[in-house]
Image: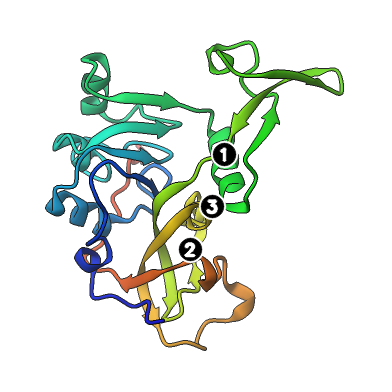
Amino acid sequence: MNKVVNGADEAIYDIPDNCTIMLGGFGLCGIPENCINALVRKGVKGLTCISNNAGVDDFGLGLLLQTKQIKKMISSYVGENAEFERQLLAGELEVELTPQGTLAEKIRAGGAGIPAFYTRTGFGTEVAAGKEVRAFNGHQHILEHALNADYAIVKAWKGDHAGNLIFKATARNFNPLMAMGGKITIAEVEELVPNGELDPNQIHTSDIFVQRIFQGKDYEKRIEQRTVAV
C-alpha cells in the first residue's frame, strides 16, 4: 500500500461535507497547517471538528471558522478566537466544551476500542448534566463516552513512507492520541524519509494507524502568545 501522497490537497481530497474530523495540536503548537489550508480551499462544510482549541482568528482552525465551514466544535480551550465567540453567542456554532484531560482520554479511549469510562472530573458541575453517575471508592464519577472520527489529521516532525511518526517536544500533545482515533488518519510531516531511517525506539505512532502521509511546506509555526523580558 502506497501511503505517500503529493501534498495536502491530495491528502484531503475525499473529505466530504458533514463529517467528523480530529485535528491535532495544542494552541498553535503542532497543528496540521497545510491540511487546514487545503480544507479551506476545498470548501468542505458542515464539519464537526474535535480539537483541543479553535485556533485564532486568522490562523489554524480560525480559518475554517471564518468561512463558516465548521458546524460543531468539540474542544477544551477556546478563549483566543473572537470569531468563535461571535458565532457561539449568535447561535451559529454548536459547541461541546470538555475538560482537557477528559477530552484527551475520550480520544485515547476511542482509539483503544473502549466505548466509555468513568471519571471524577466534572462531577457537580454543568459538565455532568444528563450523564450517568456512579460511586467508586467513595467518590462520585460521571460516565464519559469515547470519541472517534471519520478522519484524523495530525502534524509530525518526521515520518517515513510507511507512516511511522515522530513528534517533536510539546508538538506531540494530542497528535498521537488522534492518530489512533480516525477511520482514516492523514499525517503531514516536516521531513519525510525512506523506510528504515527512523530509529524504531523513537517512533511515537506506528504506521498501522496512518493511511496517508506527505511532506508539508511553508510552516509558519506561529506563537500564540509571546512573553518577553522588559
Question: Quarter of the image containing the C terminus?
Answer: top left
Residue 89 sits above or below residue 200 on the image: above
The residue that label 1 is drawn on is 146
Residue at the extreme right: 137
Question: Quarter of the image containing the N terminus?
Answer: bottom left
Q: Position of residue 163 (x, y in %)?
A: 45, 74
Callout in the foreground (1, 3): 1
At 41% from the left and 60% from the top, the residue drawn is: 184
Residue type for callout 2: Lys
Residue type for callout 3: Leu
Q: Residues within 10 Å of mark 2 (few under 14, many from 20)?
A: some
Horizontal side of residue 37 vs 221, given as left or right: left
C-alpha gap between disc 2 and disc 3? 15 Å
- Whether residue 24 appears in this view of the structure is no
Q: Residues within 10 Å of mark 3 (few under 14, many from 20)?
A: many
Q: Which mark is residue 48?
A: none
Residue type for callout 1: Ala
The residue that label 2 is drawn on is 168
Q: Secondary structure at mark 3?
A: helix
Q: Position of residue 88 (x, y in %)?
A: 27, 20
C-alpha gap between disc 1 and disc 2? 26 Å
Q: Position of residue 74 (x, y in %)?
A: 41, 33
Q: Nearer the viewer, residue 15 or 31?
A: 15
Nearest to N terminus: mark 1 or mark 3: 1
Q: Nearer the viewer, residue 220 or 182?
A: 182
The residue that label 3 is drawn on is 177
Q: Nearer the viewer, residue 178 or 199?
A: 178
Q: Residues within 10 Å of mark 1 (few under 14, many from 20)?
A: many
